[in-house]
């Protein structure tokens, strides 16, 4: 009988398991998933790109298997926007860009709240302006990881602990292994074309949106784009491994980001609730750019699932 893969060896990792599936989470590394692995065809398999010992030692979320996107996904141009008459200025938080990116929760330690054999709950408290000039709206976030023999469910909840309404976007940033024949299959309506700084310019249909419906080979498209009109299901197939993974999400994770850099052994497929620079594009409407507003004391929750499936 095949057994679960060996968990990562690191003091920063917390492990849960169910059936042949194992999930390693690194609370101190932005509440990130460090590894999601199982067994396929009697052999161990990494369903997400696993964190390296070096990334764990450096506590680098960009080297993890997936990290949370809270309280917004992707970039905000120059880190600036206006919300209900309030000017918001966010510092650049990634050396390769002058734009604020992915929120702040991915770069902060999380706390373990509950840990069982097949479930794990993490919490992160953000104190708003008292946090040192980052996101000015206070909130409390939770991630609940639930593992069954069939797959992984991740729930993300955010509560507005401030006295004013706050803008909010949520998502997760999975990194997946890439092989020469890897394909992505998903139903999408359109893609946001981007400029040289990966900021959205035009919403349109392209060959990528058409090929997604029947299976887009990752090697055939270099992308870092938001897709709209996603039906919240995507399937990744690795023909060489005779394996496939189903990604599904619930509303309002209505957008899909595909990042397929050339000459890398990974790609990213991200279920998100807002498109790049959404706070500056709200005039276009939520169907095109997403995002939400959370009232004082209000809590919202989103969910996505990763399930190994037949190729």
Image (tube, grey):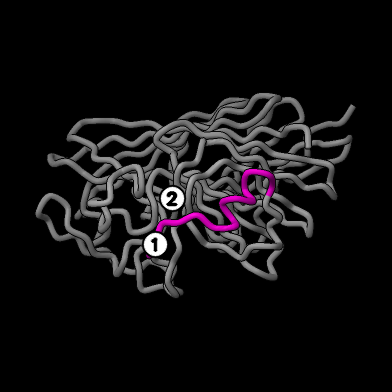
Q: Which residues are magenta?
A: 200-215
- SS at circle 1: strand
- Residue 228 against residue 304 in the figure, above or below: below
* Residue 50 pos. (x, y %): 68, 52
Question: On the rendered structure, is 244 left or right of 61?
Answer: right
- SS at circle 2: loop
Considering every residue shown, the one lying at the far left of the view is: 85
Q: Quadrant of residue 268?
A: bottom right
Q: Quadrant of residue 164?
A: top left
Residue at the spot x=63%, y=44% of the render?
Answer: 213
Q: Nearer the viewer, mark 2 or mark 1?
A: 1
Q: Quadrant of residue 14?
A: top right
Residue beneath label 1, please?
A: 202
Residue 31 visible at all: no
The N terminus: image quadrant: top right
Residue 155 visible at all: yes
* Residue 120 pos. (x, y %): 53, 31
Residue at the spot x=44%, y=39% of the render?
Answer: 253
Nearest to the observer: residue 289 or residue 65: 289
Residue at the spot x=66%, y=40% of the render?
Answer: 235
* Residue 207 pos. (x, y %): 59, 57
Residue at the spot x=36%, y=48% of the render?
Answer: 288
Residue beneath label 2, please?
A: 109
* Residue 227 pos. (x, y %): 48, 50
Nearest to the observer: residue 107 or residue 9: 107
Spatial CA distance of label 2 from label 1 is 36 Å
């Amino acid at each position: 009988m095949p057994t679960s893969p060996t968990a990562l060896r690191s003091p920063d990792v917390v492990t849960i398991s169910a059936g042949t599936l194992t999930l390693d989470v690194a609370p101190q590394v932005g509440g990130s998933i460090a590894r999601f692995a199982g067994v396929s065809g009697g052999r161990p398999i990494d369903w997400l790109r696993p964190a390296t010992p070096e990334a764990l030692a450096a506590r680098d979320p960009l080297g993890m298997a997936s990290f949370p996107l809270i309280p917004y996904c992707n970039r905000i141009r120059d880190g600036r926007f206006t919300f209900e008459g309030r000017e918001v200025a966010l510092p650049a938080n990634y050396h390769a860009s002058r734009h604020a990116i992915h929120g702040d929760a991915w770069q902060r330690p999380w706390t373990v709240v509950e840990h069982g054999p097949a479930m794990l709950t993490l919490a992160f408290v953000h104190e708003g302006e008292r946090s040192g000039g980052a996101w000015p709206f206070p909130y409390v976030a939770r991630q609940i990881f639930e593992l069954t023999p069939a797959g992984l469910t991740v729930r993300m909840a955010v509560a507005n602990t401030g006295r004013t309404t706050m803008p909010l976007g949520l998502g997760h940033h999975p990194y997946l292994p890439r092989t020469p024949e890897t394909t992505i299959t998903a139903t999408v309506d359109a893609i946001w074309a981007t400029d040289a700084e990966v900021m959205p310019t035009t919403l349109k249909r392209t060959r990528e949106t058409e090929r997604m419906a029947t299976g887009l080979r990752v090697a055939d498209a270099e992308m870092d784009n938001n897709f709209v009109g996603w039906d919240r299901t995507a399937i990744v197939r690795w023909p060489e491994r005779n394996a496939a993974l189903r990604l599904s999400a619930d509303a309002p994770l209505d957008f899909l980001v595909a990042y397929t850099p050339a000459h890398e052994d990974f790609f990213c497929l991200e279920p998100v609730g807002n498109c790049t620079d959404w706070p500056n594009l709200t005039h276009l409407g939520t169907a095109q750019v997403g995002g939400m507003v959370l009232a004082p004391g209000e809590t919202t929750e989103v969910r996505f699932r990763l399930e190994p499936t037949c190729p």
